[in-house]
Amino acid sequence: MNLTNINSGALRNLIKLTDRKESLLAEIEKIEGQLASLISGKAIRTSGKRRGRPAKKGKVTKAPKAGRSAKRAPRGTLKKKIVAALKAAGEAGMKVTDLSKKIGVKNANVHVWFSSTGKKLPEIKRVGKGHFKLAEKKA
């Protein structure tokens, strides 16, 4: 076969046949693998898809930043920090953004603390939107 004188139609036909040959060879390899596994007694998957839920990927943890440890703070640490900061702020109280900067905690964590733990404490009063103060205890 002289490849210099081949036309586009014959070339397309040649590509189709080559693709078909490759797919058939792949199918033959798959069948040979199934035969080999049946002969050896090992279980095989009949379909290419896996069944069931995919496995969870492990959570990648970041290395701790300089000066910080990777361990969690002891229980009640955030409460102590927030109450101390509100006590220092006095009657005016503090906004969550200022409070979070002062104690070194994310804004979202402080908001969540006030909406869950903070609302259970009668000495913490909400002054405005995102603004809290420590109420004086009545004797």
Image (spheres, helix red, strand yellow):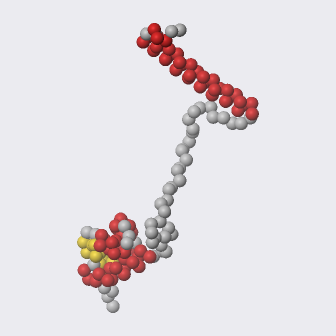
Residue at the extreme right: 40
Q: Residue drawn at (74%, 35%), measured in percent from left and top?
A: 41
Q: Relative to the observer, which residue lies in front, 16 or 37?
A: 16
Q: Is residue 122 visible?
A: no
Q: Relative to the observer, which residue lies in front, 27 or 55?
A: 27
Specify whether 125 is left or right of 27: left
Q: Residue drawn at (63%, 28%), measured in percent from left and top?
A: 30
- Vertical arrangement, residue 33 with respect to residue 101, above or below: above
**In the rendering, at what x and y percent does residue 59 appear?**
50, 55
Specify whether 25 is left or right of 128: right
Q: Is residue 12 visible?
A: yes
- Vertical arrangement, residue 97 with respect to residue 35, above or below: below
Residue 113, picture quadrant: bottom left
Look at the image and tell me in which quarter the C terminus lies.
bottom left
- Vertical arrangement, residue 67 with respect to residue 25, above or below: below
Q: Relative to the observer, which residue lies in front, 13 or 111?
A: 13
Q: Residue drawn at (67%, 26%), measured in percent from left and top?
A: 32
Number of callouts in the render? 0
**In the rendering, at what x and y percent does residue 88 appear?**
32, 83
